[in-house]
Image (spheres, rainbow, N blue to C red):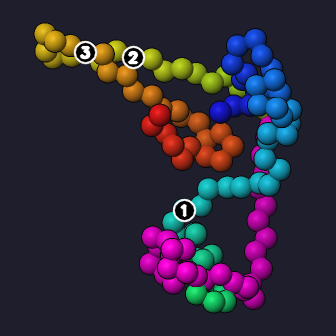
């Protein structure tokens, strides 16, 4: 979750034992499309990766080292913005309506929204 939003009256440090600034990743990362990731993975050299290390892209995964170099520059703004809650009601069709609860998040906080349906 968002390290700036401690639950209840406790601080982030009291809840998880780390200061808020210690929870913000120091290594920049950006999402890549499959085609961009494939181009980079195809440039890797070295020994073949183990079978369990093979991904879903149509290529033979390797472990490096590689002769190519990549310079990646990212530009990020660190700022606080509101995180909205979206709440709605979905009307049922039967007399025995039961509540349906769905959860999701619209953010890509820290490492990305890899688990959007919670």
Relative vertical location of residue 43 with respect to residue 108 in this rendering, above or below: below
Q: Is residue 51 magenta?
A: yes
- The image quarter containing residue 110 is top right
Residue drawn at x 13%, y 15% as measured from the top left: 94
Residue at image mark 3: 98
Residue 20 visible? The answer is no
Q: Secondary structure at mark 1?
A: loop
Other residues around mark 3 within 10 Å, as few (<14) / some (14–19) / many (≥20): few
Between 76 and 108, the one nearer to me in the picture: 108
Relative vertical location of residue 19 with respect to residue 87 in this rendering, above or below: below
Report the span colored magenta.
49-78
Residue drawn at x 45%, y 37% as measured from the top left: 117
Relative vertical location of residue 112 with respect to residue 50 in this rendering, above or below: above
Q: CA distance from mark 3 to mark 1?
A: 40 Å
Q: Which mark is residue 87?
A: none
Q: Main secondary structure of the magenta part?
A: loop
Q: Which mark is residue 88?
A: 2
Q: CA distance from mark 2 to mark 3?
A: 15 Å
**In terms of sequence position, does the residue under pointer 2 or pointer 1 come before the other?**
1
- Marks counted in the figure total 3
């Amino acid at each position: 979750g968002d390290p700036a939003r401690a639950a209840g009256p406790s601080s982030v440090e009291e809840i998880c034992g780390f200061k808020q600034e210690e929870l913000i990743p120091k290594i920049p990362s950006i999402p890549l499309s499959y085609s961009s990731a494939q181009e980079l993975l195809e440039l890797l050299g070295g020994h073949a990766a183990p079978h369990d290390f093979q991904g879903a892209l149509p290529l033979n995964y390797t472990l490096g080292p590689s002769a190519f170099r990549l310079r990646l520059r990212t530009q990020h703004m660190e700022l606080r913005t509101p995180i909205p809650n979206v709440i709605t009601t979905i009307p049922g069709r039967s007399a025995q309506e039961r509540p349906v609860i769905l959860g999701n998040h619209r953010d890509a906080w820290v490492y990305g929204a890899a688990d959007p349906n919670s």
